[in-house]
Structure formats: structure tokens, C-alpha cells
Image (cartoon, rainbow, N blue to C red):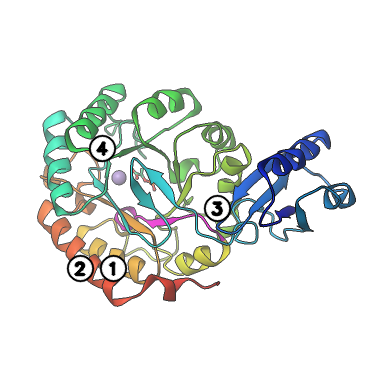
Amino acid sequence: MLIVMHKDATPAQVARVCNTIRAMGLAPHPIPGAQRVAIGITGNKGAVDTGRLESLAGVLSVIPVTQPYKLASRETKPEDTVIDVNGIKIGGGSIAIIAGPCAVENLTQAMTIARSVKRSGATVMRGGAFKPRTSPYAFQGLGEAGLKILKKIRRATGMPVISEALDTDNFQLVESYVDIVQIGARNMQNYSLLKKAGRSAKPVMLKRGISSTIHEFLLAAEYILAEGNYQVILCERGIRTFSDHTRYTLDISSIPELKRITHLPVVVDPSHAAGKRDIVVPLAKAAIAAGADGVMVEVHDRPEEALSDGPQSLTLEMFREMVGELKAIVRASPRRGLRPRS
Ligand code: PEP
Ligand code: MN
């Protein structure tokens, strides 16, 4: 259910509607728009008594939301969500370029990569401190020491940093160091972690599970939104198919489909999808051409010595060239032409 307020509704009228929704045992989610405020309602098991809400001052209309992902849906919020991370905009037509190593290995490695990718046009630095590895014997990340390195990188370069929170136990620690908290593909349906992320004041990047449908992906995002954190970035990172020539299969068609259904920014990670560096750049270009709001790629100064995901890490030089190619694609494809709904 969605309440659409009059263009000239006052903040007091919006507050009164929110209080009435709360008094009905439901949760209000005010959504400011360019023209007017809308208020999403969650928490109802069955039909909502709309009569009580329709008669309140300032209410223009009460409309049902047909999608189960009420807050993530464009029905609820037609305008793109734009997330501002220390002045860097993600969503709404600008292209975010998130780059860095799979894992933070040491200060010199991370700082060398950060300075180089920044010079080449990266807007956000990535680097895992807590790594979800398939093998328990593989490098698991530096933990808090890695987060401390990321903090130094932000101070030295001014770039916001993103790193993954692996579980509810380390969420708070990660959140306290980074600008964007990443929730990995393996955790897309870790509902207690999603709820925790929903109570965070930091933006969250949610990666698509390797066997998740778009429907499940958006409902996972809805868990975060429903707790009150509206700063959610979706990340398509490839899904598992029968195709075995790449690590995963990048679902390019999910990009325009997500952009049609949801107002949330969509960033694409071609590195984990490809598994080999030669395929990363063409996939990144395809993602931007298909309407993605940005890419996240793994970059390493010495990929052959990387402690994780070396084969799919771009060299510093490859990254620099890729940014130039992505910019050319943005110039050649007006973003507004990629928006399916007016
Ligand atoms: C990552 O980005 O470091 C990562 C582990 O990715 P994913 O969760 O998509 O496998
Ligand atoms: Mn990786």
C-alpha cells in the first residue's frame, strides 16, 4: 500500500499520516519525491483499512502496490534512488567506478592500487578484509587490520571505501570503518544479516546470490529497506549456469530488467562473473551499455602474486584503458534512453 500526498502537503500532515499508520500497527516509510511525498506501508498481513487514511488532510490517494517488494519497486518510487557517498553519487545517471583488490593484503599493496586506480578514474576503492573463501585453507583476509588499511586509504586519497561484512558478528566492526558495507553473494539470503544491514546508517551494496532469481534478489533488498535503510545498491555479479567457460554467467538481461522494476542503483561486477581478466573488460562495457549505474572490478598491481582472485584481477594498465572505453560508451549511449519507464 502506498499513500501519495498532495504536492503542497505540509510536514505536519505527513507526520499525522505516519502516526496514524503506526497506530494501526503498521510501519510508515516516507519517500520524498521530486514533486510530492509518498508514504509506503509495510507490516500488513491482509488488506489495510484505507478509508481511515484516505480521509486524512494532505492525502491525495491511497494505491495498492502490486509487487511483493513494495519499497524496492518503481511503483512506490518512480524516480531513481541516488546514493551520496561523501559526495560521490551512485545511481541516477552517473557512473560509479569501484575498483581495488579482491583482498587487502598489506598497506603498500592496497595504497599502490588505490593511488593508481584513482588516477585512472575510480570513484570508490574496494578491498576485502573478511573474505568468504570456498576453501577453509585459502587466505581469509586480514580482518580488522585490513579495515584499518582501508581507513588509511580513504584519508590519503579521499576515496570512499567498500568492504564486505561476512556475518552479524562482524557487521558492526566493518560498518564502523567503511563508507559502504558489502553483503556478498553467499549471504544474499542471510536474513539476520540483511536485517542488521537494514538498521545501519551506512549504504549497503547487496550482491545477487549465485542461484537467485530477480524476484528473490529484490525481496532480499526489501529486507534491508523494510528496516529503514533506503541506501541500497544492487550488484549483479553473475549466476551459475551450465556454461563452464567462465566462472559464472553474467546476466546482462538482469540490468534493464532491474532498472525497469526498481528505483535502486544497479552496479555490475564483471570480475567474479568472468573469472579471467581478459573477459572482464568486454563484460564491463556490455554492462554500461545495458544501463548499469556503475561497475565494480578487481584490480591488482601484481595479479600473479595476489592472495585471492589473481586470475580475474585487471592490471593497473588494463584498468586505466577500461575506464577510457567505458567513458566512450557513456558518451555514445544517452542514459535517459536506457530508462524503460518515464
Ligand atoms: C567480492 O566481491 O569480494 C566477493 C567475494 O564477491 P561475491 O560475493 O560476489 O562472490
Ligand atoms: Mn574476489
Identified by mark 1, the residue type is Lys
Packing grade of label 3 (10 A; few <14, some 14-19, many >=20) is: many
Residue identifier under label 4: 103
Residue identifier under label 1: 285
Can the viewer see residue 308? Answer: yes
Identified by mark 4, the residue type is Ala
Helix, strand or loop status at disc 4: loop
Nearer mark to the viewer, of 1 and 3: 1
Q: Residue at x 37, y 42 (%)?
A: 85
Find the magenta span and give its range: 262-272
Say whether residue 264 is magenta. yes
Q: CA distance from mark 1 to mark 3?
A: 23 Å
Residue identifier under label 2: 325
Packing grade of label 1 (10 A; few <14, some 14-19, many >=20) is: many
Q: CA distance from mark 4 to mark 2?
A: 26 Å
Rendered-image quadrant of the C terminus: bottom right
Q: Is mark 1 within 8 Å of ligand 1?
A: no
- Mark 4 or mark 3, which has the lower sequence index? 4
Residue 181 placement: quadrant: top left
Residue identifier under label 3: 217
- Mark 4 or mark 2, which has the lower sequence index? 4
| Residue contact at pointers 1 and 3, CB within 8 angstroms | no
Nearer mark to the viewer, of 2 and 3: 2
The label on residue 298 is: none
Q: Residue at x 60, y 61 (%)?
A: 74
Q: Count every numbered label the image shows and give the total.
A: 4
